[in-house]
Image: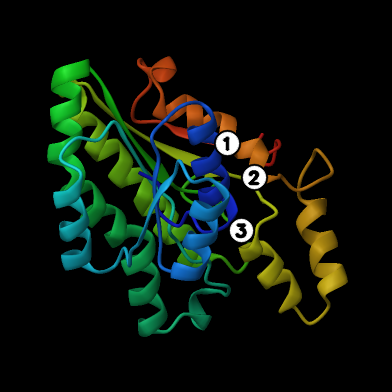
Amino acid sequence: MVTAAGQGIGRASAIALATEGAKVIATDLSSELINTLSQDYPQIVTHTLDVTDKAAIASLAEQYPELDGLFNVAGFVHEGTIMDASSDDWDFSFNLNVKSMYMMVQAFMPALQKQAAKNGTASILNMSSMASSIKGFPKRTLYGATKAAVLGLTKAIAVDFVVEGIRCNALCPGTVDTPSLRGRINSAADPVQAEKDFISRQPMGRVATVEDMTPMVVYLLSDESSFVTGQGMLVDGGVTI
């Protein structure tokens, strides 16, 4: 199961997993976006889902009593220092970036446990970021705080369920060319300079594509990573060297 699969890393991951032969269940808040995915890839099962709605998550979990993997992608990038973050901003970001993962994992854990008992392993992957406890970035206070929390949540889940064969890791991307990034660039006072600034912080001289992320996603959700758990896997083009 992949959340926020209507666009960006979520969509690319759903497609990559399906291409590898997985039966993919893709969700997104936008019915329009998720429907285009199922139209383009009929083998992918899609659902409209608000990952901040506990009742909706519980209802979906009832439909899937067995699950091999869960990729929690949904999130939001708040821009600004701590002085720019209101209480409402704080609540919104933590609800979407962290609490949604807590609710998704809690709801689908019985399905993952059932598969792990049968096959020996199941995998959870949470979207974190290089902007977290790993490294601070200007005007990313709230985002960095939420993604640091995701790393802590990931390690806690990993240690509690490792003996059951359930693995939990986090993907920590660098700057990825997604609709979210394009939105931040286009909203800047000088979009051309903003794009140059994003590129300049990457030692490889470019931002990542979603296809740079998907091999790690497939690896961490597959049995090929059966001895990997509790890790924040950086795919950042060398930013945090």
Q: Amino acid at mark 2?
A: Val
Tell whether 68 sits left or right of 237. Answer: left
- Kindly identify the residue that appears in the image at 53 percent across and 54 percent down: 39
* Residues under numbered marks 1 and 2 in contact, where contact means CB atoms less than 8 Å apart: yes
Q: Amino acid at mark 1?
A: Thr
Residue 218 on image: x %, y %: 49, 29
**Which part of the image, by quadrant, shows the N terminus?**
top left
Marking on residue 214: 1
Camera-side residue of 231 and 25: 25
Query: Nearer the N terminus, badge 3 or badge 1?
Result: 3
Camera-side residue of 84 and 170: 170
Vertical relation: 53 (above or below) 42: below
Residue under circle 2?
A: 210
Compute the Cα span from label 1 to label 2. 7 Å
Q: How many marks?
A: 3
Vertical relation: 85 (above or below) 31: below
Residue under circle 3?
A: 137
Q: Is residue 160 visible?
A: no
Q: Secondary structure at mark 1?
A: helix
Q: Residues within 10 Å of mark 2 (few under 14, many from 20)?
A: many
Q: Nearer the viewer, mark 3 or mark 1?
A: 1
Q: Secondary structure at mark 3?
A: loop
